[in-house]
Image (cartoon, coloured by chain):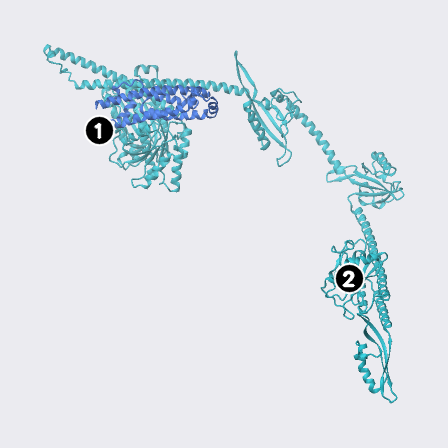
Chain colours: A cyan, B blue
Amino acid sequence: MIGQNAPDVFPDFWNYFEEIITKQHEDGITVSGKASLLLMERQAGFLEETYFDWKLVPVIGDDGLFLGAYGIPTDNTERVIGERRTLCVQNLSQRIAKTTSFDALWNHITLGLLEDSKDVPFALLFADQDALRARGTPPIDQTGNVKLVGSIGVPDGHRLKNLCWTTEAGGDGLPSAVMHAVQSSQISILSTDSAEVAQYLTGIDWKGSGVPCKQLAIMPIFAGARPLAVLVAGINPHRQYNDWYRDFLQHITTLISTQLSALRLSEELKHRAELASKAVKNFERSELRFERFAARSMVGLGMASMHGNILYANNVWCELSGVDPSKAIGCDFRDTIHEDDLPLVEQHWHNAVVLKQVVKFTYRSKAPWRKDEMYLPQRTLYATCYADIDEDGTVETITGLVVDISEQKWTEGQLLQRSRELEESEQRYRSFADLCPFGIVSTDAQGKVKWGNDSWHDFYSFKKGQVVDEQPWLPYVHSDDVDKAKQYFRTLQTTPGAHTAELRLKKKYTIYEGDRMRENDFFILIVGNQEYKDSLKTVIDSIDFWIIDISAQKMAEKILTEKMEEAIRNRTSQEHFIDMISHEIRNPLSALLTCAESICQSLSQIDPQRGPSNGALSVAKGMFTAKAKNEAIYNDILEAANTIIWCSNHQKQIVDDVLTLSKLDSELLVVSPVPVKLTDLMRSALKIFEPELRMSEIGLEMLDHESVALNGINWILLDPNRFLQILINLVTNAIKFTRGVSGGKRIKIVTSIHKERPHHFEELDFVPRRYNPLERRGSTIGPQLEDADQIYLRVSVSDTGKGLSAPEKKLLFNRFAQASPKTHVEYGGSGLGLFISRQITEMLGGEIGVGTSPSGGCTFAFYVITSKIDAPQSSYLQPPIAPAVSRTMSAPVTLLPTKDGKKGNGERTDVEKRKILVVEDNIVNQRVLCKQLRNRGFDVEASNHGKEALAALEKAQASEEGYFDVVLCDIEMPVMDGIQCVQEIRERERDGSLPEHIPVIGVTANVRSKQVDAAVEAGMDGVTTKPYRLDDLIAHIDRLLLEDSST
Amino acid sequence: MADAEEFDFGDNVDTATFEQILDMDDADEDDAHEFSKSIVFGFLDQADSTFAKMETSKYVRPDKSIHVVRTLIHYVLRKDKDLKELSSLGHFLKGSSATLGFTKVKDECEKIQHYGQKKDETGATDEPDEEKCLRLIGQSIAKAKTAYDEVKRLMEQYYAKLEGNA
């Protein structure tokens, strides 16, 4: 160095000294400086922190000139740094000594270290939180127990701030290095060069000289044997890490470690103190609780010494034992116990005290018990008793707990008494039931027999006590009734209430009718009822049955039914026989009549005076003889023919009566009221009697009672056929019985009108009605009259005949009955006429009767219900006059049957044609019916079934030709039957797609009322029967249309 | 008008009833018997097809069937239904034969109707034996067909004669 230029030698600080030296050059004063920081590269590549004291002494030449400066430097580096470090340690020591918590400790460590930032330009302080924590507190963080608790030079938000790891898992990078150091238990040095470590150090705000550290020292801090924290400190980059430096760091470590141990200890102590105080509090609380419990418990609690003296007793115990609480302490508990129970209690006491068992027993105290009306002379107590034993196993005290069970005891006593009473009563009823002639059995819900009496066992031949199956009776029930029996039992199981069933058993019931044995099923009638366990009736306790043998009734019923059926069969076959005979007789009779009429007619064309023009020969032989002979023959033939006609008529009348009766019986006769003019009707009907009356010289008088005129009767609603049938019958009878009487033969017919039912009238008794009241039947529709318009039409027929005796009158109106057996001989007749008249009168709502006329003859009278109406508008309602004629037969002229409707009823050409829809599936019948109706002046259209009918109705409604007036509908048809059809029609009428209410008449071969009802219910206005009776049918239609138009 | 009484129908036809049908003919028209004739022959066709329908219920004569097993099954399942159908067919034909007065045909049809309802021939008493009913129906169908053949022959003759006269 010598000889070299100073600036070259001291490049680091020459500039500074050059100035000083220049100044000294001028003033020549010695200049000195104190230890300022000099960074010197004493070793190559390492800037070292140095401190020098220096003195520049001017060297003055002899000439007084400044020759140069003599520099005297003194190296103070070690002293300065040493002082610095010592100060730092002292500071730190002072700081942390005051700390009382870990957090304060960490804080002061950081602050203390900051004071020597040159030597600690960077620091990380980690603490093992688990190790620091007081025992028993739960871990704080799941992410790791080692956490950064303090740092120097780490800015906020730096990744190091969040660095943490778990001791067990360790980690890589910095944590791994730290853990290594901890394991070695001494300070280790880590170079910051390695990438592993360097990654953590970017962005660090280095303190001290601001130069990044090249090395880190890792200093584990132990408290005892346990590492609690780690201090990672940056090594001063301008100082070498050497023993001196290590001593400094060691010193710091020791300081922290000492304080940490102290803190940890105090924490521990604090924790223990807390636990201790908590335990004390708990104990106090439990003591308090026990006291409260004992004082307020419902349970009596007493503690006694080994000798039985009470040491403690709560109020309940005193009350239960009958002891005054103030005197309880010290008394012998045995004194409280009922004498009878003392030996027992002594025994238990022994077991508790000597054998140290926990004993439980019931005893009675001397205290009485009372609650409301309940009373017992001693309380019954339930006690639990045990010995309290100290650590040595000796008995300290005996504790007894007692509960009052007197009420239960009382209830138990009551129960015992009740059940004894119950048993007695049940015994009584059981013997009652045992001897009962009915079967009585009680089963559980599944049908297992609980109890059954002897009669019940007898039903199935069971032996008592051997019936174990569910529903054991099932195998004995008649196979056809098993399902019924099961169903019945199910009903009982599911439906509360009594249920009854009738079952047959397999065994038979037999009786003897003389020697003949009769067998029938064995019938039983069962009544079952359930007993429930609960009031809601959900759980069945038992099902009780009462069983009665009704086989005898059933047998009687069966025999009776058989006899009845037999009787009905006999009667029916008899009637059938009569019907058949009548039919068979009628056909040839018609032939007879026709023949006889033909003869009469033929004869009338021959002039008996002239004789048959059979040629000149006979004329030549003698006209007179022939003429006389012809006349005789002519008369003979005429007489014979008339006789034949008369006889046939008579016979035919009988036959017709029988047939009418048969129809009456089958309820086939229809009442069809139509508007009639009463007087005209009667007069024209009576015309047929004129020839006969003339012949028999009987005078017929027809009178209207003043009531007729008074009530203004002209038109009334009446079924003319039925009405005339009665009238003509009565007149025929009158003629018959008057004919034989000599002189003054007269018949008087009186018509009268009544507002009230004319029960008794002019000494005349009506026969009691057979049908009462008048039933409305589909096929025999009675007069449907409004009460307001209802009047009673009464007709009486009096004659001057020989009259009847009272017993004769009684017989008159019965079937086949005549006044006397002689009657038949004298007057002929079937005896049915009056019976039929009676039936018809009743059908018309009236009565018929007989009395004595003033002349001594008979007066027959009847009345019918009818109603007054206004004269109909159109002429087509002209009543048909002829119908009843066929059964009147007095004059041959009227005999010709009205073969054709055209002639009988007159064609309805002058009125608007009525349109009728015929619905009939049988094409043959359909065409015939259509033809008949057309002949009667109807406009007819036909459909084959209901569907077609609906289509026809819709079409008619749409067309201009006009809608139908009436529908005639067969009931049994394919595709859509009459019932469905009419329902559909009514439905469409309701919804407006068809015009309102078209009358529909049903036609059926089934006249049973069930069918008729069904038809009417489906919406039909009436029902008529097959085969068609055209007159009735038309009358029916007329009536419906009249009703329809009037509404 | 040719009177039906002049023609001997025997007891096959109820003359009175049949005459009512004849009465419906319009005498003054060209074909005087058009209506009654069409009705009668309409009936004959109808009866023919009804008999055919009755016989397709072949269980009327179950013994004649070849397929024994099928028949048995069918027999058990359908017997009741067959009876009802037969009864209905009988009722149907009874209606039209009664209208025309073909008494014998009508009587047998009525029996078929009753048998089909499981009753005796009068319809008064129950006859629960289905097989017996079916057998009786078989017999009645045969009788009805005989009566029908007779009526057909008579009617053909009758109308031939009527037209011959005209």
Local secondary structure at mark 2: strand
- Judged by depth in the image, the label closer to the viewer, 2 or 1, is 2
Local secondary structure at mark 1: loop
Query: Does any portion of residue A868 appear in the rendered image?
Result: yes
Between A288 and A261, the one nearer to me in the picture: A261
Residue B47, percent from left and from top: 34, 25
Q: Which residue, given by chain and number where applicable, does mark 1 sit on?
A: B30
Q: What amino acid type is highlighted by mark number 1?
A: Asp
Query: Taking B130 as reference, is A914 left or right?
Result: left
Which quarter shows the N terminus of chain A? Answer: bottom right
The answer to whether the residues at label 2 and label 1 have Cβ atoms under 8 Å apart is no
Q: Residue furthest toward the left?
A: A620
Chain letter of disc 1 in the image: B
Q: Which dot marks residue A149? A: 2
Q: What amino acid type is highlighted by mark number 2?
A: Val
Between A374 and A778, the one nearer to me in the picture: A778
- For marks 2 and 1, give the CA distance: 137 Å
